[in-house]
Image: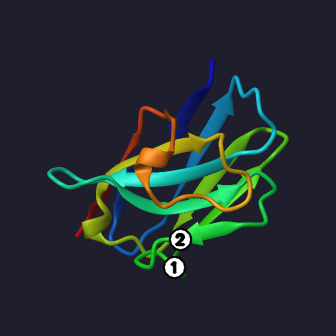
Amino acid sequence: QVQLVESGGGLVQAGGSLTLSCAASGLTVKTYIIAWFRQAPGKEREFVANINWSGDGTQYADSVKGRFTISRDYAKETVFLQMNSLEPEETAVYYCSLDTRRSSTGSLMASEYSYWGQGTQVTVST
């Protein structure tokens, strides 16, 4: 079965950087979209970034453009989220998700993603 495993979360000071990883396994399709969402306590899950299977199509939330970079290692079926200039308001659980129905352009809506990882905590201190 499909599994997504996130890693790389932790505690970082404001202005610092972290790189999250999402390792996918059990995939039975060759084309898909992988996205990162985040959810802070008491808030809805929000879109952060996504990337298509070929790696040539990415989308970012306006709040992270210019600071976050999503990339992938297709051979290792791993997606990375490089996060720079982190802000305390970005403290959240970060989730990796997979949409196997799309291949070129991903959705920004969490409801369109069928598979989810367990999440990794990112805490940004002041």
Label 2: element kind: strand
In the picture, the disc for residue 60 is 2
Marks 2/1: CA–CA distance: 6 Å
Give the residue displayed 64% in from the left and 36% down from the top. 23
The single residue placed furthest to the right in the displayed view is 75
Alpha-carbon neighbours of circle 1 within 10 Å: few (<14), some, or many (≥20)?
A: few
Furthest residue toward left: 42
Relative horizontal placement of residue 52, taking residue 60 as reference (left or right): right
Up the image or down, 34 lies above or below 56; here it is: above
Q: Left or right: where does residue 22 sit relative to residue 9?
A: right
The reply to whether residue 20 is in sight is: yes
Image height of 85 relative to 46, above or below: below
Q: Which residue is mark 1?
A: 65
Q: Position of residue 40 (x, y in %)?
A: 24, 54
Q: Residue at x 68, y 27 (%)?
A: 25
Residue drawn at x 14%, y 51% is 42
Apparent side of residue 27 relative to residue 91 in the rendered image (left or right): right
Q: Are marks 2 and 1 in contact (CB under 8 Å)?
A: yes
